[in-house]
Image (spheres, rainbow, N blue to C red):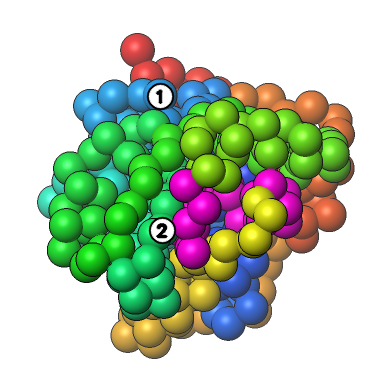
């Protein structure tokens, strides 16, 4: 069994960890760092790029692809399903469980600018938020802070607190925050500590892991002995990043810069 993952950066690794814990497979992580962040790109761009990335993962004979990115999922997953004949698992913000928890009290969705602007999210809020007042915050700054933390082990607490404060979220004081970007679980601690009373945070990693587990059970691909997991970047990694990738248990690394969007 071969499972592919796609994200613009490190965000999807928060999903990989949860899936790895329950599904034995060979993992192919495709990080489109050449076009990070996705949250500032158009829907058309994201769709075409995701098509290219999917085609590339198919050259590695993956059986299933996890679009480990809320931005790409909300803009492109339905369209991708029409283009390719393999299962895609998308990641969408956990608005429904958060609304149940909040029971009419205030909640916030923290995602990328593209995600909060999209129709997909507007519909999820209308369908599931119930009586809760929902503040939508789109931030690419937080995406870049998560990158800084994961790659360089940087202390980003003060910067995260500033972004949260400037977004009006501390004043809004939600009971729960939905982490609608796969980068944000890496900043969970920093986000919580930006509030006097920490809100409950909701992410989707465990739900995605269960979904993948369910789909894999129905696939016919025979799982042989595990080989090394593979990390593919679309722009050359620094030496420090390469070391981190090895620590994250990807035995193979390669770079695939040849295919340009334009
Ligand atoms: N990790 C992504 C998401 O879940 C994308 C972040 C970005 O590139 O803007 O939305």
Q: Residue 118: x and y, percent?
A: 24, 39
In whole angstroms, how far apart are the C-alphas of marks 1 and 2?
A: 24 Å
In the picture, the quarter occupied by the C terminus is top left
Q: Residue 213's quadrant in the figure? A: bottom left
Q: Is residue 147 left or right of residue 139?
A: right
Find the magenta span and give its range: 172-194
Could you tell me which secondary element the residue under label 2 belongs to? strand
Establish whether ligand 1 lies closer than 8 Å to the Cβ of label 1. Answer: yes
Q: Residue 76: x and y, percent?
A: 25, 43
Q: Is residue 189 left or right of residue 16?
A: right
- In the depicted view, which residue is nearer to us: 102 or 6? 102
Identify residue for label 2: 107
**Residue at the spot x=53%, y=43% of the render?**
171
Residue 185 shown in magenta: yes
Identify residue for label 1: 40
Q: Residue 136's quadrant in the figure? A: top left
- In the depicted view, which residue is nearer to us: 133 or 192? 133
């Amino acid at each position: 069994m071969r499972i592919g993952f796609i994200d613009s950066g490190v965000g999807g690794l928060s999903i990989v960890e949860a899936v790895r814990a329950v599904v034995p497979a060979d993992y192919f992580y495709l990080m489109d760092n050449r076009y990070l962040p996705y949250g500032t790109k158009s829907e058309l761009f994201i769709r075409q790029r995701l098509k290219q990335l999917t085609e590339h993962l198919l050259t590695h004979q993956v059986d299933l692809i996890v679009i480990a990115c809320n931005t790409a999922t909300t803009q492109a997953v339905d369209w991708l399903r029409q283009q390719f004949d393999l299962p895609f698992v998308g990641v969408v913000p956990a608005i429904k469980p958060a609304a149940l928890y909040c029971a009419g009290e205030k909640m916030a969705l923290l995602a990328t600018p593209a995600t909060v602007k999209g129709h997909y999210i507007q519909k999820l809020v209308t369908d599931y938020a119930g009586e809760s007042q929902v503040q939508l915050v789109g931030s690419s700054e937080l995406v870049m802070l998560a990158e800084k933390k994961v790659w360089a082990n940087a202390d980003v607490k003060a910067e995260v607190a500033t972004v949260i404060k400037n977004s009006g979220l501390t004043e809004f004081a939600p009971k729960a925050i939905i982490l609608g970007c796969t980068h944000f679980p890496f900043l969970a601690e920093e986000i919580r500590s930006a509030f006097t009373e920490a809100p409950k945070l909701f992410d989707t990693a465990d739900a995605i892991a269960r979904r993948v587990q369910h789909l894999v059970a129905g696939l016919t691909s025979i799982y042989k002995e595990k080989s090394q997991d593979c990390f593919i970047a679309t722009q050359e990694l620094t030496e420090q990043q390469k070391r981190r990738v090895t620590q994250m248990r990807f035995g193979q690394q390669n770079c695939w810069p040849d295919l340009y969007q334009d």
